[in-house]
Image: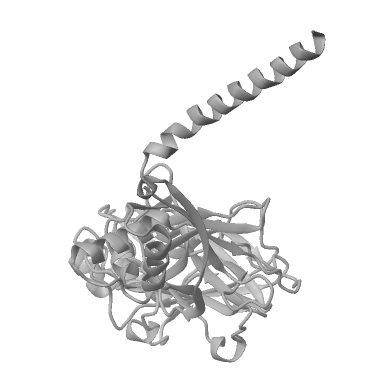
C-alpha cells in the first residue's frame, strides 16, 4: 500500500509540472515569432586621426589669458602674447602734472616657477580693434605693432604657482608725456583709441616652460600717476588715473606653436589632444555600416540603440619635468559644426554635442553616441537617403561653466595621448547595444 502511494505521488507531480510548463509557454505559443523582442550587441570599428589647429575662437566668458612660452617634448612649444586696448578714464584733473606711468599685471605661473621671464611692453602703433568684431588667436601682431616703440620691460623671477601675484612695469617718460598731453581726450573713446591704440605684451623666457595665467577682467591695468599743483607749486598729493584692460575693451590672446612642424610626430597607435589651439582628434563613424548591421539584426522591427559607448583610453607618455595636465573636459561634436558652435550661443545635446569629464578611476573619457547616431539615421530616413558612409566628429578640450551652462574652447595648457582606432592591442571602438520590437 505504501509503495502504491509513492507511485501515485510521482504521477501527480509530473502532471502538475506539465501543466505549469504549458501555462508558462502559452503566451509564447500564441504570440507570432515576428513580435519577439530582440536584444543584440556589436562592436563598430572606426577611424581616428590627429587634426592640427591654427586658431582659437575667443569667448567673452573666458576668465583668463596667457602670456609666456611653454615647451613640451610631445606637444611642442606654445607661445602666448597679448594685444589689448585699455578703457579710457573720463576723469580729467586740472592743475596737475604727470609724474610717471606703470603697467600692473596680476598673474599665476604655470611650469617652471624658478625660471626668469622678461616682460616687454610695446605700443600698438599700426592699428587697433573694433570692439564689435571677433578676432581669432592667430592674427599677426605685425598688423598692429611694428615694435618700434618699446614702452618698458621688466625681468621677473621667483614666480608663484600657488597664488596670484602682481608686478609693476614702469613705462617710458616719453609715453607718459604723450599720454598726459592728450588728457582732455580721455572722455572721448574714439579720440582716445585713435592716439593710443593699445598695448602689445610679449616675453623673453630664460627657461623652456614658463607661462603666466592672467585674469581676463582685472589682470592688466595701466596707471598714469599725477601730482596736483597748487599756486604753481607741486603738491605732495598723488592722483592716479586708471586705464584698465577690462571687459569694455577688446583683448586678443595671440597663440602660436612655432616649432610644431618639427616637434609633432604622428603615431599610428595614439592620437593627441592638446590646448590651447594645438591638436584635436577627429574620428569617423561608418553610419552606413551601422545602419546595415541594425537592419540585418533587427529586420523590420522598430530599432532602438540603447548604448553606443566610445571610450578614450589614455596612453601614458614618458615623464618630463613640466608635464601638461590632462584636459578636464572634452567635447565631441560634428566636425562641420565646430566653428558655428563656438562662435554663437552653444549648448550640449545628446544628438549633436556631448561633453565627457576625465575619469581618474579608469583613466579615460567616455561618450555615449546612441542618441547622436539615432538622430543622424532618422534625418537620412526622413530625407529618403542612404546614411552617409562617413560622419566626421572632432574631440575638443573645453571649459564648462555650471553657473551659465556655457562651453568654450579651452585656452588653458593641457595635453593627453589616447589610444587610437589603429592601436595594436586596444583600439578605439564603439560598443553598441541595440534592440528591436
Front residue (pair 335, 225):
335
- In the rendered image, the quadrant that contains the N terminus is top right
Vertical side of 248 occupied by 174: above or below: below
Looking at the image, the residue that sits furthest to the bottom is 262
The residue at 67%/69% (across/down) is 315
Residue 84: where, in percent of width, then height? 37, 68
Vertical side of 136 occupied by 215: above or below: above
The residue at 62%/59% (across/down) is 364
The answer to whether one can see residue 345 in this image is: yes
Image quarter of residue 389: bottom left
How is this picture coloured?
one colour
Looking at the image, the residue that sits furthest to the top is 1
The residue at 66%/52% (across/down) is 360
Residue 306: where, in percent of width, then height? 44, 50
Residue 50: where, in percent of width, then height? 51, 79
Image quarter of residue 370: bottom left
Q: In the displayed structure, does residue 295 sit left or right of residue 23? A: left
The answer to whether one can see residue 225 in this image is: no
Front residue (pair 320, 79):
320
Front residue (pair 34, 392):
34
Q: How many marks?
A: 0
Residue 409: where, in percent of width, then height? 42, 63
Q: In the displayed structure, does residue 8 sit left or right of residue 31? A: right
Amino acid at each position: 500500500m505504501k509503495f502504491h502511494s509513492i507511485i501515485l505521488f510521482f504521477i501527480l507531480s509530473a502532471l502538475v509540472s506539465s501543466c505549469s510548463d504549458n501555462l508558462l509557454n502559452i503566451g509564447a505559443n500564441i504570440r507570432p515569432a515576428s513580435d519577439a523582442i530582440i536584444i543584440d550587441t556589436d562592436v563598430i570599428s572606426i577611424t581616428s586621426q590627429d587634426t592640427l589647429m591654427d586658431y582659437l575662437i575667443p569667448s567673452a566668458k573666458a576668465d583668463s589669458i596667457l602670456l609666456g612660452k611653454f615647451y613640451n617634448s610631445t606637444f611642442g612649444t606654445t607661445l602666448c602674447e597679448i594685444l589689448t586696448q585699455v578703457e579710457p578714464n573720463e576723469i580729467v584733473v586740472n592743475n596737475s602734472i604727470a609724474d610717471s606711468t606703470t603697467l600692473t599685471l596680476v598673474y599665476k605661473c604655470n611650469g617652471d616657477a624658478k625660471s626668469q621671464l622678461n616682460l616687454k611692453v610695446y605700443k600698438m602703433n599700426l592699428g587697433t580693434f573694433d570692439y564689435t568684431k571677433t578676432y581669432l588667436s592667430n592674427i599677426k601682431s605685425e598688423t598692429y605693432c611694428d615694435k618700434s616703440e618699446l614702452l618698458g620691460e621688466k625681468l621677473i623671477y621667483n614666480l608663484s604657482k600657488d597664488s596670484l601675484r602682481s608686478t609693476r612695469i614702469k613705462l617710458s617718460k616719453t609715453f607718459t608725456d604723450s599720454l598726459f598731453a592728450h588728457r582732455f581726450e580721455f572722455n572721448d573713446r574714439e579720440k582716445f583709441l585713435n592716439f593710443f591704440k593699445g598695448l602689445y605684451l610679449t616675453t623673453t623666457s630664460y627657461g623652456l616652460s614658463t607661462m603666466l595665467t592672467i585674469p581676463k577682467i582685472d589682470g592688466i591695468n595701466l596707471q598714469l600717476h599725477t601730482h596736483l599743483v597748487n599756486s604753481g607749486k607741486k603738491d605732495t598729493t598723488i592722483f592716479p588715473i586708471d586705464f584698465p584692460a577690462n571687459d569694455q575693451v577688446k583683448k586678443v590672446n595671440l597663440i602660436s606653436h612655432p616649432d610644431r612642424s618639427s616637434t609633432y610626430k604622428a603615431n599610428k597607435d595614439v592620437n593627441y589632444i592638446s590646448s590651447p589651439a594645438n591638436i584635436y582628434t577627429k574620428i569617423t563613424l561608418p553610419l552606413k555600416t551601422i545602419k546595415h548591421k541594425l537592419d540585418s539584426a533587427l529586420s523590420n522591427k522598430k530599432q532602438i540603440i540603447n548604448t553606443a559607448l566610445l571610450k578614450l583610453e589614455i596612453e601614458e607618455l614618458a615623464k618630463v619635468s613640466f608635464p601638461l595636465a590632462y584636459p578636464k573636459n572634452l567635447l565631441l561634436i560634428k566636425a562641420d559644426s565646430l566653428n558655428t558652435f563656438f562662435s554663437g550661443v552653444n549648448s550640449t545635446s545628446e544628438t549633436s554635442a556631448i561633453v565627457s569629464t576625465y575619469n581618474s578611476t579608469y583613466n579615460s573619457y567616455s561618450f555615449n553616441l546612441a542618441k547622436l547616431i539615432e538622430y543622424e539615421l532618422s534625418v537620412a530616413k526622413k530625407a529618403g537617403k542612404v546614411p552617409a558612409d562617413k560622419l566626421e566628429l572632432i574631440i575638443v578640450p573645453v571649459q564648462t561653466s555650471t553657473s551659465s551652462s556655457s562651453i568654450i574652447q579651452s585656452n588653458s595648457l593641457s595635453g593627453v595621448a589616447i589610444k587610437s582606432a589603429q592601436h595594436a592591442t586596444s583600439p578605439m571602438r564603439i560598443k553598441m547595444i541595440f534592440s528591436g520590437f
